[in-house]
Each structure stands twice: as structure tokens, then as C-alpha cells.
């Protein structure tokens, strides 16, 4: 339920949504159309459709701050420094009317005006984005999350939106306290900007990380369905882990093959070096190692055959020596 206008808004920054509009909406549009219980969807649609940016700002805030107009377009990754009057932590939500037509000429208002059709169509385009931190302290930094999860497969860099920050649950506060709608572009710009009460139209802040943080978990439509970003992230992480394991296995097999090659090369090298140190005679002996040869003797050491020995003994010279002996 929206804030009771008999109580002042707790918002310091961003400016609160106009009390006059809330009163008119509660008494006229919501009740006459029996949509009072639909809360944020129709409220945002009505505020965007029927009011200019200056008319949306509550009368207790300077109308010339510029926040919520096309002079203060936030981009994904920019920081919104939220602040409220009452001490203590608060819980916040972000609700966006996402316009897929793209901001022609950088005018988010024009893009979203072109997207307005029947109230049911407008309401179907309102998305609620839950924030990860359970609570925020005053003057906390709220990083504008990506809008691309709402329309996967589209040219998300052209996506724009008009968003409202919803504050509730500071101590003693029961009803939702809505900020003025403000334009958001999906395509980031560097350096990022910081939007605060001191700088309502934003100031460049190089200290803000250039990487757009995943501040928010799973984008959720107000009709209860969810865009399963977690599943997409899980698949990506699974593919990366699988790739790393395959690379590790390949490296291990390569190392194992390389170690075996070193052992074979070492053995071959040892054999080659040993062969180079042997003499030619040793190499020849190695080649005929399995051949058995009988010892050789000179021809003079072989006794003559018997008939030759007898013939030699009967020569005249031999007989002559015998007679005269």
C-alpha cells in the first residue's frame, strides 16, 4: 500500500512522488477502477502517463532540482545515493517501466510515451527488481542494475526505462514511500555518475567501478513470473569449469607423453655413445659373436702323410748317410 499522505514522505533523496498525485490517484483512478490493491504497477503507469517530470515531484521539494527529468538520465552502473529523514535502516525495492523501443535522441520520456497503450499493457511492462542487501542505511549507495535480463535476445543497449525506488520499513514506517520516477538507459557511460541531494543531475565519479556490478539477483515481473538469470549464469559457469578441466587433462597427458619421450631419448643416446667409443675390432666381434671357429695352425706344424714320410726316408741321400754313419 502506498504512503498515507497525511504523513510526510521520509525521502531526502531522491525526491518523493507528489502527494497531490497520490491523493488524486487513490481517490479517483485506483478506487474507481478497483485497482487499489494492485499497488505499484498501476501507480507507476499513471504517474508516467499523466504527469510531466516536474509535476511528479512532491511540492515540498524544489521543482528545479532536475532529478527525474531528461536532464538527469541515469545509466546502468551509475550510483544513486539514497537518503531519508528517519534514522535506522530501511528496505528498498526498484520498480521499472521498461520501454523496448529505445530512447530516440536520448529522450527516455519519448520512448516510454510511445510504449504506453492500454492500462493492462502498461502494467505488464512494470518489473519489480528485488535488491540483494536486506537493508540499507541512510546515504547508502544504490547501484543501478542492468535491464537486459528483462528482454533477453533484444538489442539491450537501446533498452530504457522509467523507474521508481520504493522505501519501506524504517523504524515506525509501515507503508511504501515512492520516489519520483526517473529515466534509466541500459547502455553505460564511463566514468559512471553519482546522483545525490548535492548533485541531483549527477556528477562524474571515477571511483565507481567501471564494471557494472550484478547488484540484483533474479529480475521478477509483477505477474509473478521470473526471468531465470540464475540458470543462464549456471550454464555459463558450467561451460567455463568444463573447459578448464579439459585443458588440465590435456596438459597432464602432454606432460606424461613428454616424460616418456625423454626416457626413450636418454636410452637411445646412451647406446649411441657406447657404440661410438668401441674400436672397429670390437664392433666386428660384436657382429660375429654367435660364430664358433676352430683354432687355426700353420701348415709347417701339420705332420706329412705316411707315404710321404716313407718316401722321404728312402731317398739316396738318406741311405748314403745311413751307410756311412
Image: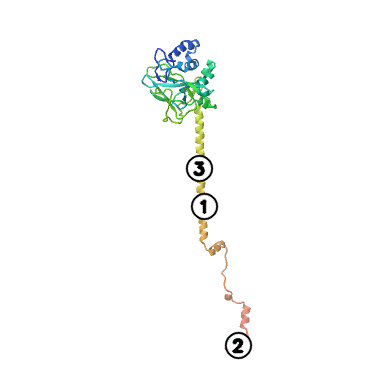
Q: Which color scheme does this rendered protein use? A: rainbow
Name the residue that disc number 3 marks: 251
Q: Quadrant of the C terminus?
A: bottom right
Q: Secondary structure at mark 3?
A: helix
Q: Quadrant of the N terminus?
A: top left
The residue that appears at 51% across and 32% down in the rendered structure is 236
x and y percent of residue 212 in the render? 46, 29
* Residues tagged 2 and 1 counted as in contact (Cβ below 8 A): no
Q: Position of residue 217 (x, y in %)?
A: 46, 26
**Mark 2 lies on residue:** 320
Mark 3 neighbour density, 10 Å: few (under 14) some (14–19) many (20 or more): few
Which residue matches tag 1? 265
Tags 1 and 3 in contact by the CB under 8 Å rule? Answer: no
Question: Looking at this view, is 77 or 317 the one in front?
Answer: 77
Residue 72 sits above or below residue 303 on the image: above
Taking depth in this image into account, of 232 and 111 the one nearest to the observer is 111
Label 1: few (<14), some (14–19) or many (≥20) C-alpha neighbours in 10 Å: few
* Pointers 2 and 3 in contact (C-beta within 8 Å): no
Q: CA distance from mark 2 to mark 1?
A: 81 Å
Can I make out residue 258 in this image?
yes
Amino acid at each position: 500500500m502506498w504512503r498515507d499522505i497525511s504523513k510526510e514522505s521520509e525521502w531526502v533523496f531522491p525526491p518523493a512522488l507528489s502527494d497531490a498525485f497520490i491523493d488524486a490517484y487513490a481517490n479517483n483512478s485506483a478506487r474507481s477502477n478497483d485497482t487499489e490493491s494492485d499497488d505499484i504497477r498501476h501507480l507507476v503507469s499513471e504517474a508516467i502517463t499523466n504527469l510531466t517530470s516536474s509535476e511528479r515531484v512532491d511540492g515540498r521539494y524544489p521543482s528545479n532540482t532536475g532529478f527525474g527529468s531528461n536532464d538527469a538520465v541515469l545509466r546502468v552502473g551509475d550510483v544513486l545515493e539514497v537518503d531519508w529523514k528517519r534514522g535506522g535502516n530501511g528496505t528498498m525495492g526498484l520498480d521499472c517501466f521498461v520501454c523496448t523501443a529505445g530512447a530516440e535522441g536520448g529522450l527516455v520520456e519519448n520512448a516510454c510515451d510511445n510504449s504506453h497503450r492500454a492500462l493492462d499493457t502498461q502494467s505488464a511492462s512494470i518489473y519489480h527488481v528485488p535488491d540483494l542487501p536486506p537493508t540499507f542505511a541512510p546515504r547508502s549507495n544504490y547501484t543501478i542494475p542492468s535491464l537486459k535480463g528483462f528482454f533477453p535476445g533484444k538489442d539491450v543497449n537501446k533498452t530504457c526505462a522509467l523507474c521508481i525506488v520504493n522505501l519501506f520499513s524504517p523504524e515506525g514506517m509501515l507503508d511504501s514511500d515512492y520516489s519520483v520516477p526517473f529515466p534509466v538507459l541500459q547502455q553505460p557511460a564511463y566514468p559512471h555518475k553519482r546522483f545525490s541531494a548535492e548533485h541531483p543531475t549527477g556528477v562524474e565519479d571515477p571511483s565507481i567501478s567501471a564494471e557494472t556490478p550484478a547488484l540484483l539477483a533474479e529480475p521478477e515481473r509483477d505477474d509473478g513470473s521470473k526471468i531465470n538469470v540464475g540458470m543462464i549464469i549456471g550454464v555459463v559457469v558450467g561451460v567455463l569449469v568444463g573447459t578448464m578441466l579439459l585443458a588440465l587433462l590435456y596438459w597432464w597427458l602432454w606432460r606424461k607423453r613428454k616424460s616418456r619421450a625423454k626416457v626413450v631419448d636418454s636410452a637411445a643416446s646412451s647406446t649411441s655413445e657406447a657404440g661410438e667409443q668401441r674400436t672397429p675390432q670390437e664392433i666386428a666381434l660384436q657382429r660375429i659373436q654367435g660364430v664358433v671357429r676352430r683354432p687355426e695352425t700353420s701348415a709347417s706344424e701339420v705332420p706329412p702323410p705316411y707315404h710321404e714320410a716313407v718316401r722321404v726316408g728312402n731317398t739316396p741321400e738318406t741311405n748314403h748317410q745311413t751307410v756311412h754313419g
